[in-house]
Image (tube, rainbow, N blue to C red):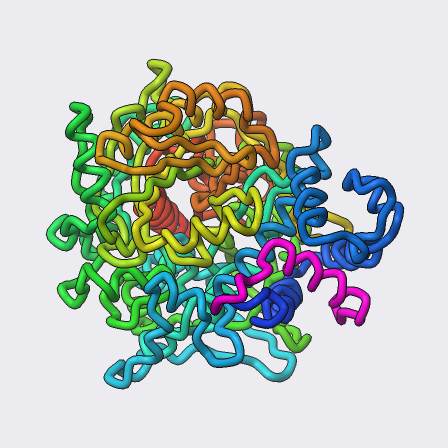
């Protein structure tokens, strides 16, 4: 959208209410340039409807009518004092109306994120200096030349191949390598661009606007923030390197859905092959300050703690650099798809194409014939192929299948998100939560809360100023400023829920995906157990102050103010409805699931769609249910197995 002066003025008032500065070195949001950052991020959103809605909201913001909605007695926002503006925003955030809370959450997260990642006029955000957070490292002079040479088209092009792979992440990259190794002519189409070691290190803002998906940013109800990668290598370039195999209990559960190979050697061999190729090891998971708190607290409670295996090489420092490589690994140590599967595929002759946004698959007489993509500048790319592998991720894959006319009722159904929340603890010692091995420890103490394998796991992860905003509440500018100034002494325990009950992915009139997801009461009860459990770990580890991401602002100070019991009661009362507690989805799965019949699944045991047998899905959307662990290895193993089966049919 092209913002008007009215839009800029309204957004500036909103941002400066959330982040007014302190007059002592921290500038107001508008002085820092946060408004421009928000419009920069918003401009990437592919959904025109959302851009128009935001423009409409800003156009109405300073009206008397909107003043009635915020409880400001019909007063224009611009006429209110700063304290009155804060109160107006908090009334939105605390509203009984879910749409009002969704508006607040969108504005809060946009404002806080933009403020915390914007370098500002000097190139170094003053907040970073005050909390001890380093300025971006910059590109590494010793980084090698990027080894891959993907194609980029500037004029309309038609290509031919045996198999076209849509998406280049964990699923697409793996499938491409397996198919190319079988002697097939493979073309990989990636919506994003290619970035390698020498491109990383420029900070959160650049990473968020180049390596991560532009949308949808949240579920339609505002329940949960959605995070996915968009670049050559997909999420494997930016994920936290955690490499857990599919649990045996999950394999057995999935086999019962009509896909028997999940419990057989075929899938077991795929898991082994994947872990070997991407270099999974537990020798590069030293105890960071973050994980040290998780381990200290859990062990003092008698809870089990295990070392997390990771897909990194000996080049990983597992320290300062490692904590930043959720934004790309400058050292080239993370064994992403670009370093492994895509490199293998390219060496075997596969063609990699970037800046290729696939819009449709043309189906005739029940067979896929061509794939149509468009570049960011509008150039059309057509690929003719014998088979299509769709590995665009569990949001984009069902959207592409729907745009292409497939009608199986399960396409877009059964979406699982592993809803994640965080509980924060402030300690005496400096933790510098943005440093240390990405993820090195896990506690499964509450992984099975119902006897059926549904519950939560506890992990930490590198928390940066921008990333943190997705899990924080806001109860006023002074409260938020105090929390950020304690950031270096703060640790977050992540609570990852294995969700039993699903959401959906649909497409709007323009064909863009819309995610609908509301946490069920069943799953919310498990998340609540996790919230209390995380607070229990932090208290046992010696935290001075503990707070959750509930918008109600729930906290306690062990031995001084409140108690763990009161914290739990307050969290339960606040609840987990949309806008009540900050949540994120970093594991997006299940929207084109595999199964034994078209009545229950979108794809058959070969990964082929029931509608069109030469369209095969090979990504996290194939999961029959949520796995309850970080899904990268499982995605790659499914893609490996599915590609082997497809190669056998084609050759």
Res. 353 in view: no
Q: Is residue 11 left or right of residue 308?
A: right
Q: Which residue, as the protein is rendered here, is positioned at the far left?
A: 283
Residue 640 in the image: above or below residue 629: below
321 or 146: nearer the eye? 321
Q: Position of residue 417 (x, y in %)?
A: 48, 38
Give the residues drawn in magenta, as a range: 1-25
**Which quadrant would residue 328 be assigned to in this image?**
bottom left
Q: Position of residue 587 (x, y in %)?
A: 43, 43
User: In this orientation, which residue lies closer to the viewer: 202 or 163?
Assistant: 202
Q: Is residue 3 magenta?
A: yes
In reply to whether residue 322 is colored magenta, the answer given is: no
Q: Is residue 326 left or right of residue 357?
A: left
Q: For residue 186, which quarter of the picture?
A: bottom left
Image side of residue 195 versus residue 111, left or right: left
* Residue at the extreme top: 451
Q: Image point 35% across, 32% down: which residue? A: 557
Could you tell me which residue is drawn at 84 percent across and 53 percent down?
60
Query: In the image, residue 207 lies at what x, y percent?
Result: 45, 67
The image shows a total of numbered marks equal to 0
Q: Is residue 617 above or below residue 294?
A: below
Q: Could you tell whether 365 is left or right of 62 in the image?
A: left
Q: Is residue 128 above or below residue 360?
A: below
Q: What percent of the width, then of the height, locates residue 570?
A: 49, 23
Q: Which part of the image, by quadrant, shows the C terminus?
A: bottom left
The N terminus lies in quadrant: bottom right
User: Viewer-proximal residue, 238 or 576?
Assistant: 576
Residue ID at (32%, 32%): 457
């Amino acid at each position: 959208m092209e913002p008007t002066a009215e839009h800029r003025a309204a957004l500036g008032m909103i941002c400066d209410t959330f982040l007014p500065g302190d007059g002592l070195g921290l500038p107001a949001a508008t002085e820092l340039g946060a408004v421009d950052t928000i419009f920069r991020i918003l401009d990437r959103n592919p959904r025109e409807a959302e851009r128009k809605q935001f423009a409409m909201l800003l156009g109405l913001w300073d009206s008397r009518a909107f003043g009635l909605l915020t409880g400001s007695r019909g007063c224009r926002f611009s006429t209110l004092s700063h304290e009155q503006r804060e109160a107006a925003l908090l009334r939105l955030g605390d509203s009984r109306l879910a749409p009002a809370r969704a508006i607040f959450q969108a504005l809060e997260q946009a404002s806080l994120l933009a403020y915390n990642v914007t370098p500002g006029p000097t190139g170094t955000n003053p907040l970073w200096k005050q909390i001890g957070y380093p300025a971006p490292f910059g590109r590494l002079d010793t980084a090698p030349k990027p080894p891959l040479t993907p194609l980029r088209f500037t004029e309309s092009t038609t290509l031919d191949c045996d198999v076209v792979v849509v998406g280049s992440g964990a699923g697409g990259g793996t499938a491409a390598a397996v198919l190319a190794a079988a002697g097939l002519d493979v073309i990989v189409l990636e919506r994003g661009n290619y970035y390698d070691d020498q491109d990383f290190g420029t900070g959160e803002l650049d990473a968020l606007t180049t390596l991560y998906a532009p949308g949808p940013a949240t579920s339609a109800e505002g329940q949960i923030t959605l995070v996915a990668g968009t670049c050559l290598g997909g999420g494997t370039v930016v994920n936290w390197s955690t490499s857990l195999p599919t649990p045996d209990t999950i394999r057995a559960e999935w086999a019962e859905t009509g896909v028997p190979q999940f419990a057989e050697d075929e899938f077991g061999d795929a898991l082994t092959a994947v872990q070997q190729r991407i270099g999974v090891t537990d020798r590069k998971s030293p105890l960071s300050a973050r994980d040290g708190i998780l381990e200290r607290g859990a062990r003092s409670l008698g809870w089990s703690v295990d070392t997390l295996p990771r897909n990194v090489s000996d080049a990983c420092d597992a320290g300062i650099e490692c904590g930043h490589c959720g934004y790309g690994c400058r050292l080239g140590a993370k064994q992403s798809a670009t370093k492994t599967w895509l490199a293998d595929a390219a060496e075997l002759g596969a063609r990699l194409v970037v800046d290729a946004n696939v819009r449709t698959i043309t189906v005739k007489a029940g067979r896929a014939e061509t794939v149509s993509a468009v570049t960011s500048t509008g150039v059309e790319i057509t690929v003719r192929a014998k088979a299509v592998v769709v590995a665009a991720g569990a949001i984009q894959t069902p959207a592409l299948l729907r745009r292409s006319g497939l009608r199986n009722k399960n396409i877009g159904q059964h979406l699982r998100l592993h809803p994640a929340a965080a509980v924060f603890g402030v300690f005496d010692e400096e933790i510098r939560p943005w440093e240390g091995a990405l993820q090195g420890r896990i506690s499964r103490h509450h992984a099975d809360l119902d006897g059926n394998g549904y519950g939560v796991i506890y992990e930490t992860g590198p928390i940066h100023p921008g990333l943190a905003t997705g899990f924080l509440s806001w109860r006023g500018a002074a409260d938020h400023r105090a929390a950020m100034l304690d950031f270096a002494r703060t640790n977050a325990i992540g609570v990852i829920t294995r969700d039993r009950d699903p959401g959906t992915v649909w497409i709007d009139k323009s064909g863009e995906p819309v995610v609908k997801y509301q946490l069920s009461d069943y799953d919310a009860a498990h998340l609540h157990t996790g919230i209390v459990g995380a607070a229990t770990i932090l208290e046992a580890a010696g935290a001075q102050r503990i707070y959750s991401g509930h918008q109600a602002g729930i906290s306690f100070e062990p031995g001084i103010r409140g108690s763990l019991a009161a914290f739990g009661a307050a969290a339960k009362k606040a609840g987990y409805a949309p806008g009540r507690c900050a949540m994120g989805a970093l594991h997006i799965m299940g929207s084109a699931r595999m199964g034994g019949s078209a009545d229950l699944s979108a794809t058959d045991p070969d990964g082929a769609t029931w509608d069109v047998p030469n369209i095969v899905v090979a990504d996290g959307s194939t999961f029959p249910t949520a796995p309850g662990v970080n899904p990268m290895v499982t995605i790659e193993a499914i893609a490996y197995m599915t590609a082997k089966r497809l190669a056998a049919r084609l050759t």
